[in-house]
Amino acid sequence: MDSIEGLAPAVASILDAARARPTPDERVAVTPRDLRAAFARAESDGRVPVIAEVKPTSPTTEGTDERDPVELAREMVDGGAAALSVLTEPEHFGGSVETLRRVREAVDVPVLRKDFLLEESHLDAVEADVVLLIVRFVDDLPGMLAAARDRGFQVLVEVHDEAELERALDAGADVVGVNNRDLANLVVNLETFESVAPHVPDDVTLVAESGIALPAEAARMRRAGADALLVGTGIVRGPSDVTENTRRLTTSMTQ
Ligand SMILES: O=P(O)(O)OC[C@@H](O)[C@@H](O)c1c[nH]c2ccccc12
């Protein structure tokens, strides 16, 4: 694994907090809602598959969103979101496993647990349909993938460059996210996705993550090969209400 060197201070602090979290003593067993099927359903009725993210705050966001996450989640689904992502990291993103539980109960689309999962026991904090594994932060990626799948989770494996993509593919990832945000400096650049996407095999489901707010940006990521888009800020802090902000992205190919 990369050392803490080379990471933005906020990210190093997130990893310290993740290591210090209490470890649950029971193993979860999940019957997941199928993420790829949800993407296919969106495609078949003409929606761009969007994973809309509930993220109360972040190291790059000012203030905390005090709106009810369940209400936001419903509005996202009303706007056509194929799936949702819920931050469960408490100290830097204002998330909680309880929020994820409540959101998952309130909607019937697949819900991704967005967190910094470093060890097997971290998987057991809460049930979700999908978990995120960030290649840069996971020592034993094949082991963590197997541990997640054993519990029933689908896994979104996050990469930022071609070398990380190789690690993800070698480990057997079948859903890969390319994060446009560089965790070394927290800067977003949509060219990141464009440079990594051509190296992803066709049978891998490919998600473009971060920095997508405008319909033109959504269209740009789709042109570059994104099967789905993961969008937080552009939806919760966009120009209209959350339903409308979601809709303008889920309908972005037709504009
Ligand atoms: O708010 P944005 O720029 O639309 O980004 C959403 C999502 O991609 C971002 O929150 C994210 C991508 N990978 C992560 C890993 C951990 C925490 C957060 C993230």
Image (cartoon, grey):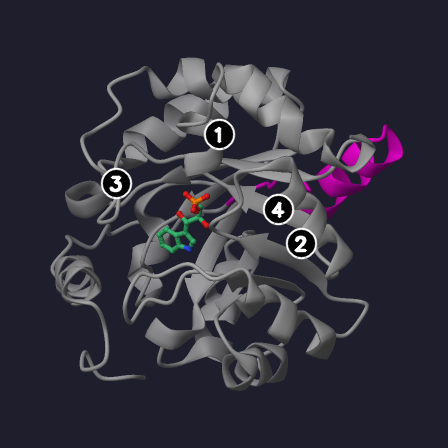
Measured in 3D between alpha carbons, the distance from the residue under mark 1 to the one under mark 4, in whole angstroms, is: 13 Å
Residue name at image x 53 percent, y 64 percent: 157
Q: What residue sits right under mark 3 in the picture?
A: 61
Q: Are marks 2 and 4 in contact (CB under 8 Å)?
A: yes
Measured in 3D between alpha carbons, the distance from the residue under mark 2 to the one under mark 3, in whole angstroms, is: 23 Å
Residue name at image x 53 percent, y 45 percent: 212
Q: What residue sits right under mark 2 in the picture?
A: 221
Q: What residue sits right under mark 1 in the picture?
A: 235
Mark before the other along the chain sequence, 3 or 1: 3
Mark before the other along the chain sequence, 1 or 4: 4
User: Start and end of the magenta stretch?
Assistant: 30-46
Q: Secondary structure at mark 1?
A: helix
Picture coordinates of residue 4, whole percent (x, y): 19, 78
Q: Are marks 3 and 4 in contact (CB under 8 Å)?
A: no
Badge 3: residue crowd in 10 Å (few <14, some 14–19, many ≥20): few
| Three-letter amino acid code at the position of disc 2 | Met
Q: Quadrant of residue 33?
A: top right
Confirm or reject: label 1 Cβ below 8 Å from ligand 1.
yes
Confirm or reject: label 2 Cβ below 8 Å from ligand 1.
no
Picture coordinates of residue 150, whole percent (x, y): 53, 61
